[in-house]
Image (cartoon, rainbow, N blue to C red):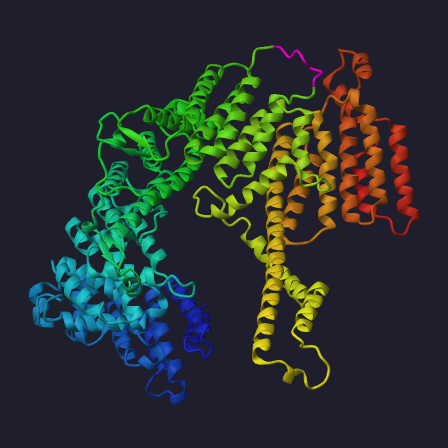
Amino acid sequence: QDDELRYTLKRLVEGLGATREAARPGFSLALAQVLQAFEEISMCSVLEQIKEKHNLEKVKKKLVRNAAFGNFFGVMALFQSGRLVKDQKALLESIQLLQQLAHHQAHLRDLPRKTLIDIMSEVPETVFEEVLFDILQSDLASALTSPENLHLLLVAIQKFPGVLKPKNLKKLFGSSTVVNEENIPRLAELLQSAAKSEKKDKKLPGLVFDLLQVSLKEDAFELFWNEGVENRLLKEKSGPVSYMCYRLLGSALPLLSLDQLQMVLKGKVMQHYGEHVVTTQLPDRFKFAPEMEEYVDEFLNSCDDPERQLAVIIGFSTLTNQGFPVFSSSSKVVRHLQPVVLQKYVDWLKDMFLRPDLDCCLDFSSNRQKQNHGNVNTAQHKISRLRKWIIHRLANIVENAVKKEESLVMDISRFCFFHAFFEAKKKTAQIREASVLPSEPIDQQAHSATENYFFGLLQTLNTLTVLGDTAKAAALREKHIHGVTADGKLWIFLLVEYADKLLSSEHVKAVKPFTKGERDAWERTLQAVKNLQKKENKSDSAKVVAFQQLLLLMAIHLFKNHSETMDVLSDLLNCTEKAFSKEPKKKKSDNTEPGWVEVMVEILLSLLAQPSLLIRRISKSVFVRICPNLTKRGLQLILDVLDPYQEQDEESAVVVMEESEKKIKSAQDMDEEGSEDSSDEGDTEEENDSGDEEENEEVDDNFRSQLMNVLQAGNALKGGDESDEELDDEAMMALDKNISALFAEQQKRIQAKKDEKDRMRKEKILRRDFKIKVLDLIEAFLTKQSENPLVFDIIEPLLRVIEQCMSSDSDKQEVDFLQKTANIFRNSLCRTKQYCKRVDALQEDLHAFVERLVKKASKHTTSSVALYYFSASLYLLKVLKGNVSDKSSTSTPLAQSNTTLQACQLLSTGCLDMERVTAIYRQALTQFLTKRKSALTCSMFHDLFKRFPV
C-alpha cells in the first residue's frame, strides 16, 4: 500500500504541470483529496516533491510555463486539502513559493496574489502574527505599488485588526490610515488599474469593495467618495472605470448610514449613471440598468431599517432626465418595501404629483436634449414628464407590491381615477383627493396619460387576489375568486360609488362633463346595479354577477368615451330589464324580437372588438356566467362570425370595421394588447410590396391612349426627322406640362389602388383577429357546457373553418387561427370526458350526422382534413354509446349490484343503432381498402377499433 501511495503521489505531482491546461486542475483536486484522506502524508515532503519536479531554475525555457503552473496548482492542492493552515512550516514555505511565482506574471498573471489572499483569509490571527507577518512585511509595506499588494494589506487590516493597529500600520506603511488625502491620488490610480484588468468579468473587483469597507472603518468614507471616486475616477472617461463606480455605488448601499446614503444618492456617480441609462438606448449598447436594479432589489430585501429603505427608493425616484425619472416605473423592487415604507412612498408620490418639487430631484439633460429643447418651457415640460411617470409608478405598485393593504389599493385607485376624469374647484375635506390643490395646473396631456394608466390599473384590480388575513378573505382565496375585496364587494363597484360621489359634489368638476342624457344613463345604471345586488343571494347568482360586472364596466367607460359607450350602455340596460323581468313569456312563438341572451351575445361580440384588454377579459368572464342560459339563436350569432363562406356585411363584421381606426390609434393605451397585429402586418408587407411592383409594371391601356392623344395634340408624333424642328419652345413647354399633368393623375390612381389594397389587407387582419377572439367564447362554452345539446351545433362550423383555413393563405395569423381552432376541436370537443346525456330525442339526427361526417371524410382529397371529420364521427359514437334509451333504463331492475351495473354499461351499446353504424363504417373501410387515393388512413380505423371494440 505504501508503494501504491508513493506511486499515486508521483503521478499526481507530475500531472500538476501537464501540457494540457484542462488536466492541471483535475490533478490538483485529486492530490488535495489524497492529502485529505491520508493524513499520515507529510505536507512538507509533498511540497518538496512539487518543488523538485517543477524546479523553475533547472527547467528548460520552453517548459517554464508548465513548471510555473505545476508549482501553483501544487500549492492550491495543499490549501484545498484543509491541512496547510495547521502545518506552520508547510504554510511558510507555500507562502514563499507563491511570492516567487508572483514574478511570473506573463504566465500566471495575478493568480499567486489572489491565492495568497485566500490563504491569509483562512489563517488565525496568532499564526499570521507568528509565522506570516515577517515574510509578508515587505509586500504590505509596498501596498501602494500594485493593486495586488494593496488588496493584501486591506484584507490583513480587516482580518487581523489586533496585529495591524494604527500604530503598527504607521511603522509599516508610513501612515496610520490607508484612506487619507495624501494617498487618494495613488489609490485612484490603483483602482483604475484594477477596473481595467477585470473588465471582462463584469463584476466589482474585490480590492475596490475592501477599500470601501476600510474607508468606512477609518471614518474616511466621505473623503474616499468625494475625492477618490467622484473627483478622480469619474473623470477618467473609460467604460470599465465608470461601470466599476456604478457597481461600487450598488454594493455600498447596505453598508452606509442614512446620511451617507443621502449624500451618495445626490452625488455625481448617480448623475453619471443616469446619463449612461439615457444615452444607451440602442439595442447593441451595454446597459447597466438591470444590474443596478438587482443591487437595489437586494438592498431593499435585506434592509430592516424603514428610513434607509425609504431614502433609497426616493433617491432613485428623484434621479430625473428633464423631469422623467431614470428608474423604471414598472420596477418590481417595491415588493420588498415594508408596509409603513410603502405607505410613505405612495404619499410622497402623490404629493410630488400635486406639488412637483423639481429642486429635490437630481436632474440632468443630455447634449442633444439641450439643443432640441432650448426654447421650450422647461419647467412645465419637466412637470408633465414627472407626473406621467408617477401615475404609472402608482398603478404599478398595486400590481407588484406584495405587502399591501386594501386601504392602500383603494387610495391609489381613487387618486388615479380622480386625476384622470376630475379637477378640484376648491379645497374640501369631504374628498381626500381634493384636500390639496395642485401647485401647477394639470394639463390635458396629463389627464389623458392618467386615464390610460387608470384603465391598466382597473385591469389589475379585476384580476387581483383577495387581500387581508381574515378568515373570510382566506375562504375567498381558496375559491380562486378575483377582483373583490375581503367583504366580497367588487373593486370596480367601489370605484363607481366613488365616481357617483364626485359627480354629486359641488367642489369638483368633471374634465369632460356629462350631458343630461349621459347623466340619466349613469343614474339608470346605478339603480340597475342596486337592484341586481338585492338578487345576488338568490338561485341565479352567476347571471346576476355577470350583468352587474358588465354594467359597472360600461359605467366607468362612460367617462372615457361618452358617445360610443352610451349606445352599448343603453342596449345593456334594456337587456338587463328583459333578463330579470318578472313578466311571464307570453309570446313564445313570436321569433321577431330577440331574447335577452341574444342581445347580450351581440353586446359581448361588439365588446370583443374593442382594443381594451380589460373589456375583452370581462366580456369573456360574463359569457362564461351566462353560458347556461345560451339559446340556439344566441349560439348561432357567434358561429356566424366564424363562418368562412358568409358575406362580411353582417353586424359583427361591421363592428370590426368600425374598430379598425380605433385599434390603430390606441397603441398607447395601457390596458391594450399593443403589438398583437404588428408581426402579422409585417409578414404580409413584403408580399404586398412585390404585388404593387408588378402592378406598376403593367401599363394601363386607357393611360396609353390618353398619352397618345396628348402627344398627337402637341404634334409630337409626326413621322420623319423634322418633328423636333417643327415644335417651338412654347409648344414644347405646353407639351411637357400636359404630359406631367397626365402622369400626375396616373400616379394618383396607382396610389389610390395601393391605399385601397392596404386598407383591405388591414381589414382582413382585424377581421381574422376578431375571429380568433370569438374562438375564446366557443372554447369557454365547450368547457363549461360540455353536456349541453347545443354542442352538436358547433361541430360543423368548426370543421368548415378548419377546411377553409387549410386551403387558404399560409400567413402567420391564418396559421394561428387554424391551430387554435384545431386545438379547441380536438381537446375541448372530441377528447372531453363530459358529454351530453340527453340525446334520446336526437338519436335519428345524430345517426344521420355520423353518416354525413364519415361520407365527407371519405370524399375528401386531403387526409389532414378528413381526420377531423372522422374524429367528429367518433365523438358522436361516444355520445350515442354513453346514452341509455328510456326503454332500456325503465326495464333495468333496481336491485342490481354496482358491479353488475358497471359491467352492463361496458357491454351496452346505449342509443347506438349497431346495424346502421356498422354499415356506415364498413362502407368507409371498403373504400379505404379498395381505392388507391383514399383520404382515409389506417390510424383512423385503428382508433375506431381501439375505442369501440364492440
Image quadrant in which you'd find residue 800: top right
On the image, the x and y values in percent for residue 84 come to 29, 66
Vertical side of 744 occupied by 924: above or below: above
> Which quarter shows the N terminus?
bottom left
Relative to 811, 460 lies left or right: left
Tell me where residue 876 appears, x and y as whole percent.
77, 31
| Residue 506 or residue 193, whichever sits in front | 506
Q: What residue is at 71 percent from the left and 25 percent from the top?
A: 789
User: Is residue 587 highlighted in magenta?
Assistant: yes
Vertical placement of residue 109 versus 869, above or below: below
Q: Main secondary structure of the magenta part?
A: loop
Q: The magenta stretch spans which residues?
A: 584-590
Front residue of 678 and 713: 713
Residue 805, image x, y percentages? 71, 47
User: Residue 113's quadrant in the figure?
Assistant: bottom left
Would you say residue 115 is visible in this rendering? no
Say if 866 sits above or below 782 in the image: below
Asked whether, in this view, residue 31 is left or right of residue 573, the answer is: left
Camera-side residue of 726 and 487: 726
The C terminus lies in quadrant: top right
The answer to whether residue 359 of the structure is visible from this angle is yes
Q: Residue 378 falls in which quadrant of the image?
A: bottom left
Residue 389: where, in percent of width, then height? Answer: 32, 47
